[in-house]
Image: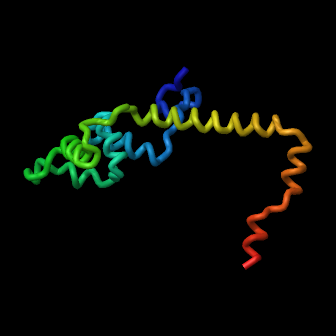
Amino acid sequence: MQVVGLPEEDDPMAKKKKQLSPEYQLWVDAQKRFHLSHAHIQMARQLGMNPKRFGGKANHKQEPWKLPLPQFIEKLYFKRFKKDRPDNVRSIQQMVKDKRRRQAERKDSKHHQQESETPQEVSQQLNAPDLRVRSAFRK
């Protein structure tokens, strides 16, 4: 049920979407603003480009010697990687989803590893001398 007169973001019953981190949100905004495909965004990320600087590079109407931004990214990508497109094109949302999944798997495996250790193994690890610290003082 939506309250009449309130925008959707003010509606307490509206579902909240998970926000992307600012790092990824910049790329999503640049993709929308400059009409880039998922492949172009991925190529630009692999090239180490800054999405905040796309405005100066996408000025091909006022400066006719410049290539349009998608063609410019493709040209740089081919020059550096000697191929037209990335092998596996993924959207920013898919990259974030995969990253979260990997982090959850790593956290679960670490948790299971800690559960599987016996108390005797833990006490041995705590009582074992740290040889790295001792070797630093031998000089």
Q: Viewer-proximal residue, 62 or 11?
A: 62
Residue 33 screen position, x and y as percent: 29, 41
**From the viewer's perspective, is 111 left or right of 66?**
right
Rendered residue at 68%/38% (across/down) = 107
Query: Which residue appears farthest toward the top when viewing the image?
Result: 1
Residue 14 screen position, x and y as percent: 54, 27
Rendered residue at 20%/49% (across/down) = 58
Figure coloring: rainbow
Query: Which residue appears farthest toward the left when viewing the image?
Result: 64
Q: Quadrant of the N terminus?
A: top right
**From the viewer's perspective, is 128 left or right of 43?**
right
Rendered residue at 46%/35% (across/down) = 95
Q: Quadrant of the C terminus?
A: bottom right
Residue 86 screen position, x and y as percent: 32, 36
Vertical comparison of 110 with 49: above or below: above
> Number of callouts in the render?
0
Vertical comparison of 4 with 44: above or below: above
**From the viewer's perspective, is 119 left or right of 104?**
right
Query: Which residue appears farthest toward the bottom when viewing the image?
Result: 139
Residue 69 screen position, x and y as percent: 21, 45
Rendered residue at 73%/73% (across/down) = 136
Based on the displayed image, in which of its 4 quarters is residue 130 positioned? bottom right
